[in-house]
Image (spheres, helix red, strand yellow):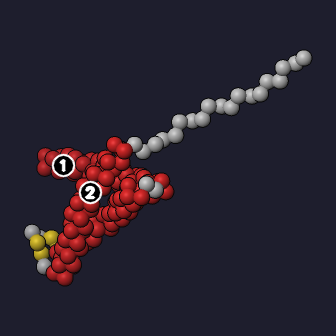
Amino acid sequence: MEEIQTPTPAPAAPELKVTPTAKSFLATTTKWGKFLYVVFLILFVFMALCSILFLVLGKEPIEDTPAFAFGIAFLVGIALYIAPLIFFGRSLKAAKAAVESDDDAQLTEAFKNQKSLLKYTGILTIVLLAFYVVVLIAVIVAAISGAFAGAL
């Protein structure tokens, strides 16, 4: 007689578990994160107030630069600063909820927002580094052009 062999099931992939120690670290992280979030919110409001002040001053010069230009610079800073602030706040809120209720969906949401925060910050860093390189090259070219013009 032939033996009938039953296929053996494939071993289950190990599942990630949140240990009590990891949960404790996450709880501590959310407390420090909340502190930093409040500091960032205060800085955001300060930047907004500075922007309004400079825009109101308008053409009054500050070191030969119209105050309006500083207002625009602060507005650009605010525009770049708001998305990470939102992602950070959402991540903290979801992480706190995950720790308090042992909710996997909230933990996933926290990590999703943390990913968005880090991705945004990384892309912004790359863009700013590229901008700095372009400015550095422009300054070097201007300095060399000025040196040659002065020699003639």
Residue 44 vertical position relative to residue 58 in the rendered view, above or below = above
For the residues labelled 2 and 1, the Cα–Cα distance comes to 49 Å
Q: Position of residue 124 (x, y in %)?
A: 35, 54
Residue at horizontal 16%, vertical 81%?
Answer: 57
Q: Which residue is mark 1?
A: 143
Binning the other alpha carbons within 10 Å of mark 1 as few (below 14), some (14 to 19) or many (20 upward) gives few
Disc 1 element: helix
Q: Which residue is mark 2?
A: 31
Residue 112 in the figure: left or right of residue 144 = right
Residue 105 in the figure: left or right of residue 99 = right
Near-viewer residue (59 or 33): 33
Extreme-top residue of the structure? 1
Residue at horizontal 34%, vertical 63%?
Answer: 89
Tell me the kind of residue under disc 2: Lys
Residue 145 in the figure: left or right of residue 129 = left
Residue at horizontal 34%, vertical 43%?
Answer: 21
The reply to whether residue 14 is visible in this rendering is: yes
Looking at the rendered image, the disc whose residue lies closer to the viewer, 2 or 1, is 2
Tell me the kind of residue under disc 1: Ala
Which quarter of the image is occupied by the N terminus?
Answer: top right
Disc 2 element: helix
Near-viewer residue (57 or 21): 21
